[in-house]
Amino acid sequence: MANEINGFGPRNLGPNGSVDSSRGRTEAKGESQRASGSATNGIKEDDAVTLSSGASQLQEMGRAMAESAPFDQANVDRIKDLISQGEYQIDSSRIAEKLRQFETL
């Protein structure tokens, strides 16, 4: 029965029919302390987290992105110079093709 599994059966009800949560916490805390042995606050010394290879790769990519510039400053400076000299050429057919490709995604 579900009440027996989750511990909220009739034995944990207070005098007005509400859950006596302090009783459940005391029992759980005692069990946790017994299970942990000499570790403090119920934390085992041998607890560890292991990341999958995919998560490790994502973490490394995040570090690399954080260390790099979000854009190519040299390219931005080059384009600025071309615009200021009036030599920057806009390829409207290339822009239209890129927009078409984007819309078909």
Image: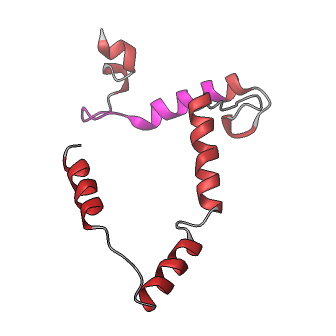
Residue 5 in the image: x percent, y percent? 38, 14
Q: Is residue 55 left or right of residue 4?
A: right
Q: Which picture quadrant has residue 65?
A: bottom right
User: Which residue is rendered at x = 76% and y = 28% of the image?
Assistant: 46
Quarter the C terminus occupies: top left
Left or right placement of residue 89 versus residue 28 in this view: left
Classify the position of the N terminus by image quarter: top left
User: Which residue is farthest right?
Assistant: 38
* Residue 44 location (% of width, % of height): 72, 31
| Front residue of this view, candidates 103 and 57 | 103
Question: Quadrant location of residue 27?
Answer: top right
Main SS class of the magenta portion in the image: helix
In the visual, does 38 lie left or right of 48? right
93 vs 9: above or below:
below
Is 41 in the magenta?
A: no
Relative to 61, is 16 above or below?
Answer: above
What is the span of residues highlighted in magenta in the rendered image?
14-32
- In the figure, 61 relative to 46: above or below? below
Q: Nearer the viewer, residue 24 or 41?
A: 41
Q: 32 or 85: which is nearer to us?
A: 85
Q: Position of residue 79 (x, y in %)?
A: 47, 78
Q: Which residue shows up at 69% across the image and 35% down it?
A: 43
Which residue is pictured at 25% across the width and 48% down the height?
101
- Pick the front one: 31 or 43: 43
Q: Residue at x 70, y 31 (%)?
A: 48
